[in-house]
Amino acid sequence: MEVNEAAIGAARTQPGGILFAVDFEVLTTPRPYPMTAGGGAITLSSGSGNALDEASFTASFRSTSGSLRNSRPYVQDTTAAASITADPASLTLTRQADGTFAGQLSTSVRYAGDAAHDDLRIEAVGLPAGVRLSGTFPASPCFFSSCTVPGGRFMAGERHFVDLLFTADPTTSVGDLGTVQLTVTTHYGASAVTDADPSDNTVSVAVSAAETL
């Protein structure tokens, strides 16, 4: 559960302080029964980052019918549930005006649970010689052979579509180049989150180069 900073209401001065209305966002699936979660806290900090005060709170999640009666404890997933598909599972790079090769591959990434995460990343493993993962569409940060999935955090059951952009050296041979493994991983803070079922985290894609399509 996190504060949606864009949804913080305008401050209202009242005797003894300033009143704020704050919206929260929970990336979990609505249930036919209400839920409660404890352990929430809001910290007041100074401009220099020093914590001045803290208040605890309990959150209530309405059921799909709007009820808050007979609630159950909310239990968040501790393992990720990410998957990736590519359709078709083949990539053709074509010659460009500058002599290099370029192509794009349409992929779909789904997140089935609500385990805490900051982002999902796609890594291209075993790229043929001279072939590089150069970016995504929509645009998202890429480092070496890994790119962040665009669209930010996932809600449970949400799917993001991303085109992976590839380039290859001018000296690349025309024809079949081999295969590349695309693997999706979940990250929270500085650590990767263990996936409940790694079997659907990787897809194999055949790579080839051509003078024209």
Image (cartoon, grey):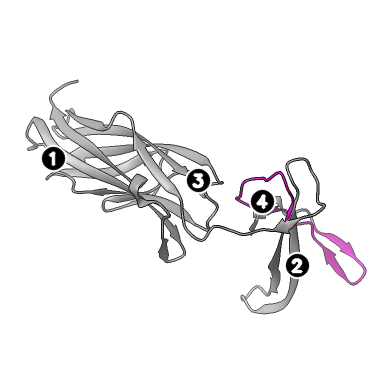
Image height of 162 relative to 13, above or below: above
Residue annotated with mark 3: 112
- Could you tell me if the residues under marks 2 and 4 are in contact, i.e. CB atoms within 8 Å? no
Task: Give the residue type at disc 3.
Answer: Ala
Mark identifier at residue 193: none
Residue annotated with mark 4: 6
Residue situated furthest top in the rendering? 213
- In percent of width and height, residue 139 lies at 40, 41
Task: Give the residue type at disc 2.
Answer: Phe
- State which mark lies toward you, 1 or 3: 3
Q: Taken as a whole, is the magenta stretch helix, strand or loop?
A: loop
Disc 1 is placed on an element classified as loop
Name the residue rendered at 70%, 69% in the picture: 41
Residue placed most toward the observer, 35 or 7: 35
Residue placed most toward the observer, 171 or 209: 209
Image height of 93 relative to 109, above or below: above
How dense is the environment of label 3, judged by Cα within 10 Å: few (below 14), some, or many (20 and up)? some
Q: Relative to 155, is 55 on the left or the right?
A: right
- In percent of width and height, residue 121 lies at 38, 51
- In percent of width and height, residue 50 lies at 64, 79
Q: Earlier in the sequence, mark 2 or mark 3?
A: 2
Region in magenta: 11-35
Q: Earlier in the sequence, mark 4 or mark 3?
A: 4
